[in-house]
């Protein structure tokens, strides 16, 4: 058993491990090449998060999905570069919106260079992703554009909040399907499609990726409350401080509204107060970490991860399928 990719994913076959490692190394080289500019400062800003590392969750999924066809097909690595560039670009923009100071254990681009440079660098990465995508054909362009539309729509819906009468938890899960599930689904779809896998396999892996992506983000929600910055590489409670609802907070609000327990009502009031105060922010984090709402969010994470696993059932057994199943376990483990 060896270890490769995010969360210490173990791959139990030497040939598969070699394919994945070779593919990820090629993606890394492709990311560095795609983020180079004739202007040295743009190169520095564009490579800031590339060089900071990261899980490369989406490229890994491209490589694993490609195992159901020809993993050496010429479009596999470029499509993985496209999805990771797109993901990186959204991180630059997200950090501006969240006013985040830390990303992947290093100062965020907005903290280092200001909001304008961070936003424009994200735009630069989107442009470079589009340049690479153009060589993969019109169908790939269409798929990516639809996913990007869903991603942006999800971000807008999150910012706007649920409409009157809509269940906030249901609204939030729809948001995550767009913001995170869409690009993870495309990662699986590109890997299978570029490798020439059967259309039925492409469809199965796309649906798997959608559910896995939501589980992945729900695990991040749990980590934002439960972890410290050393574990996650990000400042804990960023969404909390910015007033962005995540699943543990939504479950807390639902519990307070349904049962009216004084301690829940008081905690909701604290959540809604000025959390730029460090002591108050720390107090809210401390209380949320022991609240049943956090455990409920963990259960939701497990549910989506199990749905993703179930989607894989029709695929032929093998090391690639086992690795995709283990991805579900790894996402759940992050939330524990």
Image (spheres, grey):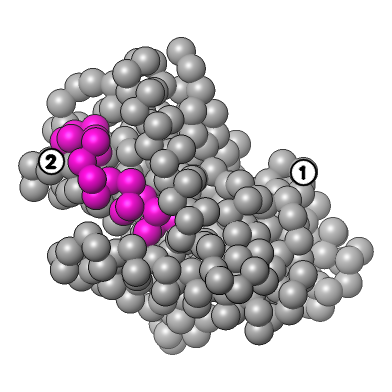
Horizontal relation, residue 257 to residue 83: left or right: right
Whether residue 130 is visible to the viewer of this picture, yes or no, is yes
User: What residue is at 34 percent from the left and 70 percent from the top?
Assistant: 130
**Image location (x, y in percent) of residue 90:** 51, 68
User: What residue is at 38 percent from the left and 57 percent from the top?
Assistant: 83
Q: Which residue is mark 1?
A: 230
Q: Is residue 76 a member of the stretch shown in magenta?
A: yes
Q: Is residue 212 above or below residue 37?
A: above
Q: Which residue is mark 2?
A: 197
Spatial CA span between label 2 and label 1: 40 Å
User: What residue is at 76 percent from the left and 66 percent from the top?
Assistant: 101
The magenta stretch is 66-84
Q: Secondary structure at mark 2?
A: loop
Pick the front one: 143 or 331: 143
Indicate which disc residue 241 carries. Answer: none
Q: Nearer the viewer, mark 2 or mark 1?
A: 2
Whether residue 264 is visible to the viewer of this picture, yes or no, is no
């Amino acid at each position: 058993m060896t270890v490769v990719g995010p969360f210490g994913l173990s791959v139990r076959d030497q040939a598969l491990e070699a394919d994945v490692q070779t593919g990820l190394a090629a993606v890394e080289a492709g990311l560095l090449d795609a983020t180079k500019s004739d202007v040295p400062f743009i190169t520095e800003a564009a490579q800031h998060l590339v060089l900071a590392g990261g899980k490369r969750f989406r490229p890994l999924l491209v490589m694993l999905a490609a195992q159901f066809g020809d993993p050496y097909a010429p479009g596999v690595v470029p499509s993985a570069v496209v999805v990771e560039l797109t993901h990186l670009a959204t991180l630059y923009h997200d950090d501006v919106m969240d006013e985040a100071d830390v990303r992947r254990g290093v100062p965020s681009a907005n903290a280092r260079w200001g909001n304008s440079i961070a936003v424009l660098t994200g735009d630069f990465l989107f442009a470079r992703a589009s340049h690479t995508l153009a060589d993969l054909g019109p169908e790939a362009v269409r798929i990516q554009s639809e996913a990007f539309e869903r991603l942006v729509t999800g971000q807008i819906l999150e910012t706007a909040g649920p409409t009157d009468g809509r269940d906030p938890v249901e609204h939030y899960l729809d948001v995550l399907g767009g913001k995170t599930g869409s690009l993870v689904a495309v990662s699986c779809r590109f890997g299978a499609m570029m490798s020439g896998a059967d259309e039925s396999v492409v469809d199965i892996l796309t649906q798997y990726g959608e559910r896995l992506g939501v589980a992945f983000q729900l695990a991040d929600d749990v980590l934002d409350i439960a972890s410290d910055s050393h574990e996650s590489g990000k400042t804990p409670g960023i969404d909390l401080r910015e007033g962005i609802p995540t699943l543990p907070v939504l479950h807390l609000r639902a519990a307070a509204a349904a049962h009216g327990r004084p301690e829940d009502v008081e905690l909701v009031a604290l959540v809604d107060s000025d959390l730029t105060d460090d002591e108050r922010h720390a107090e809210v984090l401390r209380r949320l970490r022991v609240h049943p709402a956090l455990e409920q969010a963990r259960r939701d994470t497990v549910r989506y991860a199990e749905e993703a696993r179930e989607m894989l059932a029709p695929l032929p057994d093998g090391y690639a399928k086992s690795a995709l199943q283990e991805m579900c376990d790894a996402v759940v483990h992050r939330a524990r």
